[in-house]
Image (cartoon, coloured by chain):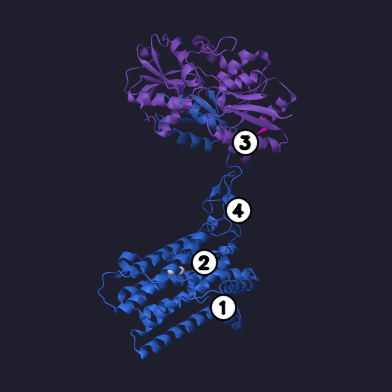
Amino acid sequence: MTLVMGAVAYDPKVVTIWAGFRAWFARQGFDFDFVLYSNYERQVDDLAAGRIDAAWNSPLAWIRARRLAGGRLEPLVMRDTDQDLTSVIVVREDSPYKDVADLKGETVGTGAVDSPQATLIPSALLRERGLRPGEEVAVRRFDVGVGLHGDHIGGERDAARAMMSGDVAAACMIDADHLLFVREGTLPPGGTRVIGRTRPYDHCTMTAARATPETDRFRDLLLSMDAADPDVRTLFDLEGLTAWRPARTSGYALLERAVDDEGFYDPAGAVTAPGYRP
Amino acid sequence: MTDPVLDLDDLGFETGAHLLVQRALGDLAPGARLGVRGRDPLLDPHLRAWCRPRGHTIVPAGGPVLAWIVPGGADRWSRAERAGDPGGVAAKAPAHWGLAARGALVEPGGPEPAFDLADRDLVWAEIAPALYAHAASAQWDPATAIPWDAEFALPPDIERAVVQIMTYLVENEQAALVVPARLLARVHPHFREVAQLLAVQAADEARHVEVFARRAALTGGPLGTSAAGGRESLTTLLTEPDFSLASFLLSVLGEGTFLNLLAFLDRHAPDPVTRRAVRLARQDEARHVAFGVAHLRHRSETDPHLRSRLRAAVERRHDALAASAGLNQDVFDALILLAAGEWSPQAIRRGHAAVLDLRREMDEGRRRRLVHLGFPDDEAAALSALHTRNFM
Ligand SMILES: [Fe+2]
Ligand SMILES: [Fe+2]
C-alpha cells in the first residue's frame, strides 16, 4: 500500500524536496507518494478525514488536526531544527522602547494572520505583558501567504522593513529570521534591539492520520536518514534540517494558548478567526 | 579535561561572531564542548539560531558562561575529495568535479555538468599551459596595432582584389572562431589550460574577423563575393564532433595552409593596412597550428589508430566536397592580380606563377606537418592532395 503524505506548496522547492524524498524512499523499497495543498486548512481537513495517511504539518495545522481528529492522530517525526525556537519583538536601536510594556499606545508589525511565529505567539507575549492587541497596542498585520501558516516569510520581512522605516514601532519575527534579515541586509547590523522574547516552542511536525505498519516504517526510515549521505544531505539542506527527531508534543502549549485567546480555531477545530481566508 | 570557553567580548552574530565560534569549534577536541560568553544583548537568540541549522545542541550554562555548544550535525566534508592535483592533470576528470578548481576540496552531492571531453588524452597537449601564457601575452589591440589612418590610394581594380580577399578571409575567420568556441564548451574545466587556450584562440579569430572586415570596408566600396563552394568547405569543419579530428582539419590542415596564404598576402600587400593586418593574424595562426600539432602528437602517442582515423577524416571531407567548386574563382583571380600588381600580360604571368608557388608551398607545409605526425612520405603527399581546394 502506498503511503500518501500531504504537504503544503508554500514554495516551488517543495516539489523538489518531496520528489527527492519519494525517490529516496523508493530506493529503500518503500512505496511513498505525496500530494500538495495550496493551504494548510485543506490539508488538515483531509488528514482528519483520513483521505491522506500523513501530513507535514505546521504547528498550527497540528493543533487544528488534533482538535478535529483527537487521539487518532499519531505524531511521527520533526526536524531537529523545529525544536526550542523563540520569537522576538524587535525595535530600532535609536527608538525609546526598552521593554514590551513601552509599546503601549504604539503599533506593532506582525506577519500574516496565521503565522504562529510572527503573529500568534508574539501576540500572546504582548497580552501576557498587559498589551491586548487592538486595545492597549495596535497591530498591523503583513498578510503575505495567508493559509501557509507563516511558512512564507514575506510578511515577517515586510514587518521588519516597516519597523526600520518607522511605519510601526516594533516588529515580530522568529529568532533565526532576525539574524537572516541582518545578513541579507533588510536590517542594518547593530541597528535593532530585542525588547521581548517568547519562551521556547516547537514548530513543524509530521503527523499520521492513525498509526499503521506503513506509518511506523515511514517514521523509522525518516529517522534513519543520515546527512553524511550526499543524496540525503541535498534534501536536508533544502528542507532545513540536519536530522529527523522523534516527534514530541510538549512544545505547542504557547501556541494552543494563543489560538484560544485569539479565537483562531474553536475547541472542535472549526476555523473561527475573523477575516482569515486561506 | 576542561572544556574551552570562547569570550566574544561585545562581538555579536550581526557583525561576524560566527567566525570565532566556527574556528573554536574546529579546534575542539573530540567529545569536548565549547562554552561561549559575551556581552552582546542578542547573543543568546542568535547563538541558538546559528547553531540550530548546523545540528549543534545548546546547553544552558551558569555563571559567566552563557551556554555550552555540543557540536553535532554531519560533517559535510567527511566524504569530500580533491579535484585532482593542482600541479598536474588527471587522466580522467569525473563529472562531479564539475566547475571546481583543480585541486579544490569538492563537497559531494553537487551537480554533474555534461562536459563530454573529460579524458586528458582527448584534449591535452603538454605545451598547452605555455602556449596559453604566450597567447595571453601576445594579444594586440586592433584599434592601435594597425595603421588605419595611413594614407594610400590603390588603383580601383587592385582595391577590389584586396576587398575580395578580405571578404573571403572574413568567412574563413568566422568558421575558425566557431569551431574552437564549440569545442571549448565541451572541455571539462579540469583541463583548464586547454579551455583557456581555445578561449584565446576564439578571441584571436574575433580580432581577425574584425580587422579583415574593417579593411574590406575601408574605402567604402561593396564587399566581394562569397561562393557556395567555399562556405560548403567551411561548414564541413563545423560539423566534426571529434576534438582531435576537428583540431586536425581546422588547425593542422586549414590554419596550417593559411600560414602560407597570410605570408603570401604579407609579401604582396599593396597597402600598409592590409600588410599589418595579415602579419598580425599570421602570428596568431602560428599558435593555433602549434597547439593542433602538439595535441595530435600527444594523442598519437597513446592511440595507435589515430592516424588511420585522421586519414579517414580527410577522405570523408574530400568526398563530401567532391561535387563542390572549392576555392571561389574570384578569390583565385584576386590573388593573381595582387601578386601581379598591374594588368600587363607579363605581370599577370608573374602573378599566376606566384599563386602556383603559393599552392606548392601550402602543399609542402601540409606534408611536413603530416610527416611530423608520423605519416610516411607517400601517404602525407596523398592526404595533402585531398585537402580542400578552399585552403581552409
Ligand atoms: Fe584567424
Ligand atoms: Fe586560427
**Helix, strand or loop for disc 4:** loop
Whether residue A100 is visible here, answered yes or no, is: yes
Say which residue label 1 marks. B386
The answer to whether marks 1 and 4 sit on the same chain is yes
Please state which of the two labelled residues, at mark 2 or mark 1, is closer to the viewer.
2
Report the span colored magenta.
Answer: A223-227
Q: Amino acid at mark 4?
A: Pro
Residue at image location 34% in from the left, 75% down from the top: B160
- Chain containing mark 1: B
**Helix, strand or loop for disc 3:** helix
| Residue B50 percent across, percent down from the top left | 49, 30
* Disc 2 packing (10 Å; few <14; some 14–19; many ≥20): few
Quick one: A184 or B266, which is closer to the camera?
B266
The answer to whether marks 2 and 4 sit on the same chain is yes
Quick one: B308 or B209, which is closer to the camera?
B209
Name the image quarter holding the N terminus of chain B. top right
| Residue B269 percent across, percent down from the top left | 35, 78
Say which residue label 4 marks. B94
Residue at image location 44% in from the left, 65% down from the top: B174
Q: Which chain is purple?
A: A
Please state which of the two labelled residues, at mark 1 or mark 4, is closer to the viewer.
1
Whether residue B74 is visible here, answered yes or no, is: no
Q: Which chain is blue?
A: B
Say which residue label 3 marks. A19
Say which residue label 2 marks. B235
* Disc 4 packing (10 Å; few <14; some 14–19; many ≥20): some
The answer to whether marks 3 and 1 sit on the same chain is no
Please state which of the two labelled residues, at mark 2 or mark 4, is closer to the viewer.
2
Please state which of the two labelled residues, at mark 4 or mark 3, is closer to the viewer.
3
